[in-house]
Amino acid sequence: MTAHRFQDSARYWRTPLLPGADLLTAEYRDHEFSPHWHDAYTIPVIVAGAEGYRYRGSNYVAEAGSIPIINPGELHTGSKAIEDGWRYRVIYAPVDYIRDLADEIAGKPCDMPWFEPGVIRDIDLAQRLMHAHRLLESGGDPLAGEAAMLDALSTLLARYSQTQPEAARLATDDVRVATMQECLTGDLTASVTLAEIARAAGLSAFHAARLFAQATGMPPHAWRNQVRLQRALGPLRAGVSVTEVAAASGFTDQSHFTRHFRRMFGVPPGRWQSN
């Protein structure tokens, strides 16, 4: 157990030294992250306490000094694993950045890096990541911060990345799921019914809903809201008002948008944007 009982407190921030990335410094006790995914590599380091999460069908506990990495687009949760909660630092590293770094390390073009599910327990790597994160957050010497981040991320890739498993040949059900996803993401502001996506996939509404949930881990409406949230990040970074982003993303109103955003990111969109 930790001596300190953590509070729900989070700060998202960005740095030009890691273009396109979001970084998070946070502690949580009562907040629980609903099932969600990120378009980026999620690279957390648990600083104190312990976090529990579900990922790719298994439950994990990440304690202080561990790195519970999540691949892009992978559904996962997050909540306290002990009563006091947990504190961590997170890098949401863009896919292109990590892929380019992997190419540089290998000296040749590589497939998209992939990390085995589970908690990485490597104190040396955790210290490198925490050191780099702190340097970038302090806004001090940019040369030192960038060098530390490159050192940490290249160490992560050299020690733990694998070639992304080759996708199996698409079965009929995979094609149907992809068809439904296209219907759901074509126009995020349009009203879409289950009957419409089922018809596009050549299924009954019942079978469409069951197949979609089995394939993605969530029902169609929840999956669509995840896409809306991911697409909202760019306009928020660019300074577009929360009200405008909520409407453009297809949420019924700002409060609806804020509720879903907080469940996924741990802070309301206005605070996420202002950091």
Image (cartoon, helix red, strand yellow):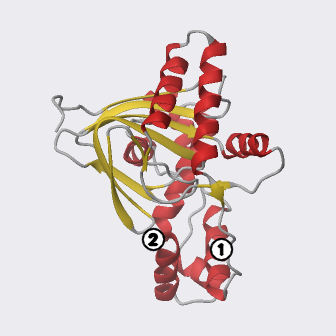
Residue 233 versus residue 241 in the image, above or below: below
Label 2 and label 1: CA atoms lie apart by 14 Å
- The kind of residue tagged 2 is Pro
Q: Can residue 15 be seen in this view?
A: no
Instruction: From the viewer's perspective, tell me whether residue 206 is left or right of residue 203.
Output: left
Q: Can residue 65 be seen in this view?
A: yes
Residue 178's disc number: 1
Counting residues from the N terminus, which is met first, the one under dot 2 or under dot 1? 1
Q: Which residue lies furthest to the top in this view?
A: 140
- Tell whether label 1 touches label 2 (CB within 8 Å): no
Circle 2 sits in a helix, a strand or a loop, which is it? loop
- Residue visible at 45% across and 66% down in the picture: 56
Circle 1 sits in a helix, a strand or a loop, which is it? helix
Q: How crowded is mark 2: few (under 14 residues within 10 Å), some or many (20 or more)?
A: some
- The kind of residue tagged 1 is Ala
Instruction: From the viewer's perspective, tell me whether residue 109 is left or right of residue 164.
Output: right
- Residue visible at 51% across and 42% down in the picture: 43
Q: Mark 2 points at which residue?
A: 219
Quadrant in the picture for residue 265: top left
Q: Residue 215 location, x and y as percent?
A: 52, 75
- Residue visible at 68% across and 30% down in the picture: 19
Q: Residue 257 location, x and y as percent?
A: 45, 45
Residue 202 versus residue 30 in the image, above or below: below
Instruction: From the viewer's perspective, tell me whether residue 268 is left or right of residue 185.
Output: left
Camera-side residue: 260 or 117? 117
Q: Quadrant of the N terminus?
A: top left
